Image (spheres, helix red, strand yellow):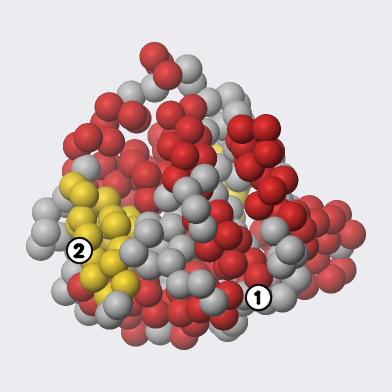
């Protein structure tokens, strides 16, 4: 295993720019809007780049949608990749089953593979953030033959997170919100949406552009939407047990030092689960919301990683 550990920073991350200073909203109009049909489900998606370019499939987290990848999609598309991000199971209105067990990680992995198949990609680059990172780790360990490369933002390897949570009280309590989200009585939904979704809005810590926050909250306030996204948490154990083994594909892991949910212990343990080439990048001062908060740093790292893998 080639283990490259770098610290990028300090970088002046902080509050999201004011709307008049942030071009992301207007640039979103440059993206293609797609519908990807997979069996009985229909996924909405955003895309950029030439249709015959190497596929880079991007998986979003909670409480986000494909739009969280706007800047990354545009940059990868401009570099010649066919960059696609889809609203995953529960987030797409046409892929919102009622049963909690339908949100188990094996179904989420199967969705990602099916979307890649629909793009005609036998092998592809995979990029994930937050819960999308969990899915990415699981897919990479189970189906390494499908991947050209793996890149994960924020989320440590699932077993590294489980170990850190079991041994480190700080990491255990950072995941208290997960235990709350797993309650089946609707308490999480009521709390997050009360007072014009004040608690849900606060989760972004002021690091995500306001237009994205407002759109996320609008979509998550639709009947059944928030419950569907929280079912990702309810389909696994309290410690976010996701089936992921050792990783053989070339991997880039980017972690922000100010991540409130995922601490340094789990982040540094991740190297122990990588057998292939590994590049660990720490963004000092950055929070959990890396795709929206720090695209100017994330994009060059991704482009360097992807180009090295063909």
Badge 2 local density, few (<14 within 10 Å), some, or many (20+)?
Answer: many
Up/down of 263 relative to 98, above or below: above
Give whichever of discs 1 and 2 has the lower sequence position. 2
Q: Which residue is mark 1?
A: 236
Quadrant where the C terminus sits is bottom left
- Across and down, in percent, residue 236 comes to 65, 75
Q: Which residue is mark 2?
A: 54
- Across and down, in percent, residue 9 comes to 58, 34
Name the one closer to the observer, 7 or 46: 46
Judge depth for marks 1 and 2 and give the one in front.
1
Name the one closer to the observer, 187 or 171: 187
Residue 149 visible to the viewer: no
- Across and down, in percent, residue 168 comes to 86, 62
Determine whether the residue tagged by mark 2 lies in a helix, strand or loop: loop
Determine which of the numbered discs, if any, sits on residue 77 in the image.
none
Count all numbered tags in the image, as a single digit.
2
Name the one closer to the observer, 212 or 303: 212
Left or right of residue 178: residue 23: left
* Residue placed furthest toward the top: 20
Residue at image location 48% in from the left, 33% down from the top: 214
Q: CA distance from mark 1 to mark 2?
A: 33 Å
Residue at image location 47% in from the left, 48% down from the top: 222
Residue 70 visible to the viewer: yes
* Residue placed furthest toward the front: 223
Residue at image location 58% in from the left, 24% down from the top: 15
Residue 219, quarter of the rendered image: top left
């Amino acid at each position: 295993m080639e283990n490259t550990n770098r610290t990028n920073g300090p970088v002046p991350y902080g509050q999201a720019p004011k709307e008049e200073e942030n071009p992301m909203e207007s640039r979103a109009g440059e993206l293609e809007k797609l519908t990807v049909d997979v069996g009985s489900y229909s996924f909405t998606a955003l895309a950029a780049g030439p249709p015959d370019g190497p596929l880079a499939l991007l998986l979003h987290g909670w409480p986000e949608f494909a739009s969280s990848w706007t800047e990354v999609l545009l940059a990868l598309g401009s570099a010649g990749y066919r960059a696609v991000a889809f609203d995953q199971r529960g987030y797409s209105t046409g892929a919102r089953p009622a049963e909690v067990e339908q949100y188990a990680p094996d179904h989420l992995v199967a969705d990602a593979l099916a979307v890649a198949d629909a793009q005609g990609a036998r092998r592809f680059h995979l990029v994930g953030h937050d819960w999308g990172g969990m899915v990415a780790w699981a897919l990479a360990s189970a189906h390494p033959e499908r991947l050209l490369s793996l890149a994960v933002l924020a989320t440590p390897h699932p077993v590294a997170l489980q170990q850190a949570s079991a041994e480190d009280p700080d990491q255990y309590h950072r995941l208290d919100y997960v235990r709350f989200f797993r309650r089946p009585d609707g308490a999480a939904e009521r709390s997050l949406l009360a007072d014009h979704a004040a608690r849900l809005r606060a989760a972004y810590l002021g690091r995500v552009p306001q237009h994205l926050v407002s759109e996320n909250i609008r979509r998550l306030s639709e009947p059944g939407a928030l419950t569907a996204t929280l079912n990702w948490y309810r389909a696994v154990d309290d410690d976010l047990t996701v089936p992921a083994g050792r990783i053989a594909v070339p991997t880039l892991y980017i972690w922000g030092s100010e991540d409130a949910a995922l601490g340094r212990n789990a982040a540094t343990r991740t190297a122990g689960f990588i057998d292939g080439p590994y590049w660990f990048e720490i963004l000092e001062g950055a929070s959990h919301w890396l795709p929206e908060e720090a695209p100017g740093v994330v994009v060059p790292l991704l482009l360097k990683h992807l180009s090295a893998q063909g």
